């Protein structure tokens, strides 16, 4: 998936840096690439502000040091992971063309996890679209999704998930994921729903079971 900004914007991205809350090497804990080794780049800044967010420290874009694109590329490549996951916060509030160009220039796969709150920029091998009720996704985002991952917090979220499933491509993988604090209550409901609607799959946050980042 290659989503590039206008030509006039590209020259501004030389030497660009991004606010980074943290970057680290771990395993992908959720969704289609669950269990795969991956280097995570968690960008600062988020206006979605889910009430159950487990990284609320990421919300203030000005609270995190800016790290150069080249440094992020070097760290990701040095990890040895073929996959780099850009997440947040809400990563699409930043122009990601320079970052993805740097990563792909180093032969790395580029994955993004986003609520779709803003238009997508950059060159992506995998787009995980996780819409949230707290801020409506941008109307253009669903068309880019390789994976739709909906967090289920309340029983009404199943119908909400179906509304977004109708917007993504037929080849998009569909996942329902229990909100962590209500997992014991919600997971049986998801199991029953997937049995009735088998085009969906279940995503679990296995990194939390394994106590890894």
Image (cartoon, rainbow, N blue to C red):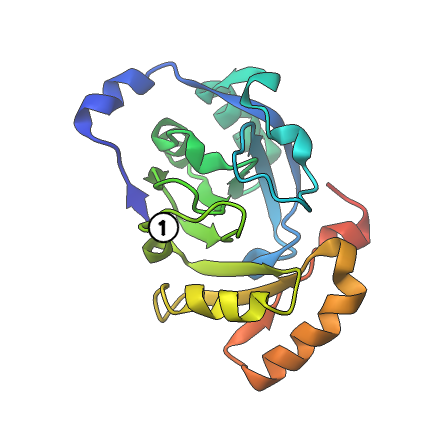
- The foreground one among 62 and 123 is 62
- The foreground one among 205 and 142 is 142
Question: Residue drawn at (40%, 56%), measured in percent from left and top?
Answer: 145
Q: Is residue 34 visible?
A: yes
Question: Residue drawn at (68%, 77%), measured in percent from left and top?
Answer: 191
Residue designated by label 1: 141
Q: Residue 149 vs residue 181: left or right? A: left
Vertical relation: 53 (above or below) 171: above
Quadrant of residue 21 in the image? top right
Question: Residue drawn at (67%, 29%), measured in percent from left and top?
Answer: 57
Question: Residue drawn at (69%, 75%), measured in percent from left and top?
Answer: 189
Location of residue 201 in the rendering, given as x and y in whole percent from the top left corner: 58, 71
Q: In the displayed orientation, state which residue is furthest to the bottom.
A: 196
Assign the C terminus to one quadrant of the image. top right
Location of residue 75 in the rendering, given as x and y in whole percent from the top left corner: 57, 26
Location of residue 99 in the rendering, given as x and y in whole percent from the top left corner: 41, 29
Location of residue 90 in the rendering, given as x and y in whole percent from the top left corner: 51, 37
Q: Residue 77 vs residue 8: left or right? A: right
């Amino acid at each position: 998936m290659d989503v590039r900004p206008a030509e006039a914007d590209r020259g501004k991205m030389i030497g660009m840096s991004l606010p980074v809350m943290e970057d680290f090497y771990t395993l992908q804990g959720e969704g289609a690439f669950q269990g795969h080794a991956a280097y995570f780049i968690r960008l600062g800044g988020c206006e979605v502000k889910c009430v159950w967010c487990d990284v609320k420290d990421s919300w203030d874009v000005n609270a995190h040091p800016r790290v150069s694109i080249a440094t992020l590329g070097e760290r990701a490549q040095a990890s040895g992971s073929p996959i780099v996951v850009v997440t947040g916060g809400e990563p699409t509030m930043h122009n990601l063309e320079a970052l993805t160009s740097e990563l792909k220039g180093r032969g790395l796969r580029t994955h993004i996890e986003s609520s779709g709150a803003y238009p997508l920029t950059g060159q992506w091998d995998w787009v995980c679209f996780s819409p949230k009720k707290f801020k409506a996704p941008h109307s253009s985002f669903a068309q880019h999704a390789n994976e739709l991952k909906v967090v289920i917090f309340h029983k009404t979220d199943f119908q909400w998930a179906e509304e977004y499933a109708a917007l993504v491509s037929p080849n998009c993988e569909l996942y329902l994921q229990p909100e962590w604090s209500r997992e014991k209550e919600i997971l049986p409901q998801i199991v029953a729903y997937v049995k009735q609607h088998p085009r969906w799959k279940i995503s679990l946050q296995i990194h939390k079971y394994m106590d890894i980042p």
